[in-house]
Amino acid sequence: MAAGSAPLPASGEGAEDVDTNVKTLTFRSAILTVVAALATVTLLSLALGAYPISISKLFAGELTAQDWSILTGLRTPRVLAACAGGAAFALSGAALQALFRNPLADPGLLGVPAAAGLGAAIALIVVGAGAALWIGALGGAAIATSAMLVAARRGAHSASLGGSTSTLLLLGIAINAACAAGLAMLTALASEGQLKTLSFWMLGSFASLTWTQVLMMCAVAIVAAIALQMNANALGALALGERTARSVGVDLRRVRFRVAVVTTAAVAVVTAFCGGVGFVGLAAPHLARLMVDASPRKVLPLAALIGALLCVLADVIARSIAPPTELPVGAITAILGVPLLVMMVLRGGGRTQ
Amino acid sequence: MIVARTPLLLVTNLGVAVRDRVLLRDLNFNVDAGEILALLGANGAGKSTLIAAIAGEVAEHAGRIEFDGAPLASHSLGQMAARRALNTAEPAVSFAMPVAEYVALGRPFDSPNAADIHDALEACHAREWSERDFATLSSGEQMRVQLARSLYQLGETPNALWLLDEPCAHLDLAQRSFVLTLLANVAKSHGWAIVFSTHDPAEALAISDKALLLRAGESVGYGATAETITEDTLSQCYGVDVTRASAFVATK
């Protein structure tokens, strides 16, 4: 490298007084910490409930037939659903925050959960509860997803560079507003019972899912994790701004399209089955960035694990506070998430430009 | 130094319009490997638009932009990233990141090469900031780290093109002189073509081989720097009477 020969004092003043270095854990220790916490909470989740199962018996293999049926029929699918759902929301949030270059982005921003909610409400009122609700939610999410993809493609062909990301954002806001309006109209038409079902679904729950649904959620979470990880370097370069990212070789159209497809699909499936589990998509990537740094290569897997941890923990809390009543998981994730976020913001951890 | 038969960057009859507003009209210039071209003009004269066009960001334009003998659009994003670096006027990042990691983003798809990153930062006298959060640096310091990112991006590639939008905008006398010297050295030692924009004729006179003076998107002068930058052309370019007087400059 050729060096400039002009003399220059290299360091700025004040560098020693204020600690301006980026503080981080090593990636490996962060992953290990979260995995250990997740394992602990998972065991708790398997053991706790209206019918307690002894962990020592589980390890000793001395479980009764009834223990087994509760474990495999109720608690395991529940834990897996919470893991997959939390991971899917967290991955989507992490990817969208990198894509929009904004730490406030989360899956709800693109309007997919809202559209799923509207779809569920329509199905509930027209057809009734049960499978129709999920199908309606999936349908609503699919429509929002398609709208988003059309916008992403359109943006991809427009001459201007910066415009298309804000196009996505604006469309998301429009979808959210339209769905909120639709939902408000429907609630006027719904019966008392329908309203209760709907509001409980919208607050989220990992309970009473079939193994098919749980496996679908797991598959979606795994595919999203792999697909987003493959785009992690491009997402990382986006931190430089879209112009500069392009100049170092990032194909913005491709990244934008892929991230939109993967995140909306993942959020659609999870929301349809589990309802609106809020705040995980926002909080998990934040926590991951605080533990390591902002590089998506590290943030994506770590956020997925943190999201899983938050959701399994929220699920345990939801059914342990006032058994046999189950509190809505979405409310618990928000209750866990809000103080974390406030703490981080006050510490300056949420700082951006 | 290798000199290509066709100039590294060849621009003919370039015009850019957004809707009905003409931003650039009928520009003709070329830059060869090892040469420095300064773009001069008042605010809004079209300097940044021109840099964006050369960077391939403007999909629809009149005229031709050729890089290394072929139309700009025929080079892939990856090919261009290996041979063309861009420094924007505002190098803001969206998340906290250490300076070394910022520099590593010059080649986002390669695993970071610590030695090259070190060298790039060293060349910009920015090595001791490598652990610092990029966003905590002053704007002048950020500019120098951005230079390091581009040095890391292009490495030892010969016949590369480096585009800089107002690289000295936020810099004090000492830093400005440092950056200009760095650009001049790199153009010679690496054989790179450099295009940079500035408000200040002194910067062009200090290091550039050629100058292009813009006014409202049109050329009011183009050629060897010393002959092109005159009281006459500057007066036209900025729309005020300009006379030559002595000024303070930082020297080695």
Image: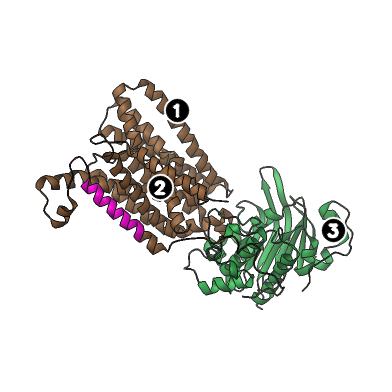
Chain colours: A brown, B green
Q: Position of residue A28 (x, y in %)?
A: 38, 64
Magenta residues? A32-51
Secondary structure category for the residue under label 1:
helix
Q: Nearer the viewer, residue B103 or A308?
A: A308
Q: Quadrant of residue A128?
A: top left
Q: Amino acid at mark 2?
A: Thr
Residue A300 location (% of width, % of height) = 41, 55
* In the foreground, B207 or A303: A303
From the viewer's side, name the closer residue of B195 and A283. Answer: A283
Residue at x 68%, y 67% (from the top left corner): B194
Cα distance between the residues tagged 1 and 2? 24 Å
* Picture coordinates of residue B198, whole percent (x, y): 74, 59
Disc 2 target residue: A263
Residue occupying image coordinates x 59% and y 48%: A160
What is the chain letter for disc 3? B
- Residue B8 magenta-highlighted: no
Residue B200, placed above or below residue A152 = below
Quarter of the rendering containing residue B79 = bottom right
In the orientation shown, which residue stands out farthest toward the bottom? B1
- Cα separation, mark 3 vs mark 1, equals 61 Å
Secondary structure under the numbered disc 3 in the rendered image = helix
Mark carried by residue A181: 1
Q: Residue visible at 38% across and 31% down?
A: A118
Q: Residue furthest front?
A: A17
